[in-house]
Image: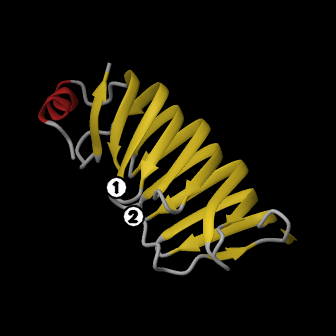
């Protein structure tokens, strides 16, 4: 949802980069439906019964509903219930895609119970033609919002629904 002052700023300076300490971003396309199955494909798999983890390596792609996560390495942490996934820890360059929204970062931690994805290190979020960068982004998949922090830079293209929320300076 775009606030009135952001819309006014866009009309006044259509391609002006916005620099801020942190910002909240509408993330409408990325929603969690934990009732859907999680599908994982990879080149290799190592399972550890002792600590309840599975390490997927090489061209890892994870899908749940409309969301796709890709990374070279993903550690799956299982819960106490058999077959229940608690968390996914992706590293080595992560891409998260849902609809027209995509995010990239050095690593990501997807907490399934909390419904959050925390992406850290060189975060790049694209929404249509708009781009936002930061060092950290936490996506709340239940509400469809994201919080970005760590030298946030926003480039908004004029003439389209930008999908960004308010930025604090």
Position of 169 relative to 95 (above/below) = above
In this rendering, the answer to whether 29 lies above or below 34 is above
Task: Name the residue located 44 percent from the left edge and 49 percent from the top edge.
Answer: 139
Task: Name the one closer to the observer, 45 or 78.
Answer: 78
Q: Position of residue 5 (x, y in %)?
A: 15, 29
Provide the residue designation for mark 2. Answer: 31
Label 1: state its secondary structure. Answer: loop
**Image-based side of 106 in relation to 7, left or right:** right
**Where residue 85 sits in the image (x, y, percent)?**
62, 69
Residue 43 at x, y percent in the picture: 84, 71
Circle 2 residues within 10 Å: few <14, some 14–19, many ≥20: many
Quadrant for the C terminus, please: top left
Horizontal arrangement in the rendering, residue 127 relative to residue 7 (left or right): right
Quadrant of the rendered image containing residue 82: bottom right
State yes or no: discs 1 and 2 in contact (Cβ < 8 Å): yes
What element does badge 2 sit on? loop
Q: Residue under circle 1?
A: 144
**Residue 128 in picture, x, y percent from top left:** 38, 52
């Amino acid at each position: 949802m775009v606030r009135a002052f952001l819309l006014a700023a866009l009309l006044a300076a259509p391609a002006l980069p916005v620099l801020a300490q942190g910002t909240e971003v509408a993330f409408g396309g990325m929603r969690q439906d934990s009732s859907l199955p999680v599908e994982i494909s990879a080149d290799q798999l190592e399972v550890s019964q002792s600590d309840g983890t599975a390490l997927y390596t090489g061209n890892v792609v994870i899908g749940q509903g409309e969301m796709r996560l890709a990374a070279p390495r993903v550690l799956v942490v299982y819960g106490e219930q058999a077959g229940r996934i608690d968390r996914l820890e992706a590293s080595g360059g992560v891409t998260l895609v849902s609809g027209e929204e995509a995010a990239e970062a050095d690593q990501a931690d997807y907490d399934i119970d909390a419904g959050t994805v925390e992406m850290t290190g060189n975060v790049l979020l694209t929404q249509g033609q708009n781009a936002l960068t930061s060092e950290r982004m936490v996506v709340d998949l239940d509400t469809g919002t994201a919080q970005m922090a760590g030298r946030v830079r926003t480039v908004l293209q004029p003439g389209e629904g930008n999908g960004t929320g308010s930025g604090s300076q």
